[in-house]
Image (cartoon, coloured by chain):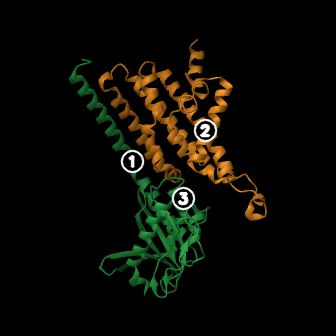
Amino acid sequence: MATRKNFSIVAGPLSRSNPITTQVLGICSALAVTVKVDTALVMSGALIFVLVGSNTIVSALRNLIPSRVRIIVMLTVIATLVIVIDQLLKAFLYDISKQLSIFVGLIITNCIVLGRAEAFALKNSMRESALDGLGNAMGYGLILLLVAAARELFGSGSLLGLQIVPDFLYAGQGGWYVNNGLMLLAPGAFIILGLLIWLQRTVTGYREE
Amino acid sequence: MPGSNSYTYFFVITMAVISALLLSVMKISLQERQEFNKALDTKKNILKAVGALEPVMNSADVEELYTLKFTRQAVRDSQGNEHGFYIYGSPESPEGYVLPISGKGVWSTINGFIALEPDKNTVKGISFYDHGETPGLGGEIEKDFFTSRFAGKKIFKDGELVSVTIAKGRLQEQSDYAVDGISGASLTTEGINRFLRDDLTDYLMMLGK
């Protein structure tokens, strides 16, 4: 069944073959942009754009690309798309693009993007490649959002900039609660990510060979 | 013919030309908007330095307040180079002065503004923008929790320009000339210490000491 296969192309990377928790790719940016939920959201959006775009274009060109220079051709496609999204963000979402700073540019080196182009888009139809890109980017985005939500909630007491932990609980205002500063630093992201990987592997029973 | 050298050259050059064309068109069509955002961000940071920036302000409010309240002037340093600064309020009875500051952090040039009270000694506020410091570490310098520490500090001690120094970690004792640092941002704040003092020196003539 075509639709069933398409569904598994999209849904697989959300959990079973998630690029972050199962393949442990794209960790660098996953740590860097997850201090707050809004940056993680925009970053995920940017990755969806780049990954769907690069997979589709690489797949469309798959019979034309000379295999000796395929990596550099794929990187050209990816780099072009990344610059496009970076410029768009600078024009339309300036404040968030400032916070994401170099990390949008670093999507070029995100192993997920080149990995999917090489492993999937070069061998499959445009339609399937686009779906594969969408699935993998959403799998990445899902983990980013989970990590960001945990970090923003415990690190800053807010979600999407809205304060969740009430003021009166804070130590300064007569309460006892203190935000966990560790969550704002990279080690905090590592810990959350580690817990997520543990949780996911316990549930799915996935084992590293 | 696929596989031949000439085909590879042809393909690679075509790819390069198409990407270059796309990016050029993109850049030119978005340039105006991006420059507008950048200029607006600078104005926002001038307002932020004097503490006049409210979160609810839209771009028109910022423009209006900026045009209404700020006059640009210039002063020469001991070498005869000109340095611009802004007078906050009417030039006859100023409510403050805003001096642009910039210099090297760890990874990038940090830009900012320091606002002084009419006594040209007490710091009204400070803002940092347009930098490429590590988000979450050095990048924290632009956050309110840090910039608010400068308000009320003094830059002259017994007629001598001492500037405001950012300590490593917490201050040992309260001082009019130093503020608490940010852990994980020592090198960034060391850079700021250096260029803040240097840049204030350029304005000695105007500071009138």
Q: Position of residue B168 (x, y in %)?
A: 53, 65
The residue carrying mark 1 is B29
Q: CA distance from mark 3 to mark 2?
A: 23 Å
Foreground of the two, A137 or A189: A189
Q: Position of residue A6 (x, y in %)?
A: 56, 19
Please tell me the numbered disc located at residue A193: 2
Foreground of the two, B170 or B53: B170
| Residues tagged by mark 1 and mark 3 found on one chain of the structure | yes
Q: Position of residue A148 (x, y in %)?
A: 62, 44
* Type of amino acid at the residue the image marks with label 1: Ser
* Chain drawn in green: B
Q: Secondary structure at mark 2?
A: helix
Disc 2 packing (10 Å; few <14; some 14–19; many ≥20): many
Q: Position of residue B132 (x, y in %)?
A: 44, 55
Residue drawn at 28 percent across, 27 percent down: B11
Q: Chain of mark 2?
A: A
| Residues tagged by mark 3 and mark 2 found on one chain of the structure | no
Q: What residue occupies the far top of the structure in this picture?
A: A1
Q: Colour of chain A?
A: orange
User: Dots 1 and 3: beta carbons under 8 Å?
Assistant: no
From what the image shows, is residue A87 above or below residue B204? above
Residue drawn at 59 percent across, 67 percent down: B170
Q: Secondary structure at mark 1?
A: helix
Q: CA distance from mark 1 to mark 3?
A: 32 Å
User: Dots 3 and 2: beta carbons under 8 Å?
Assistant: no
The residue carrying mark 3 is B140
Please tell me the numbered disc located at residue B146: none
From what the image shows, is residue A134 above or below residue B89? above
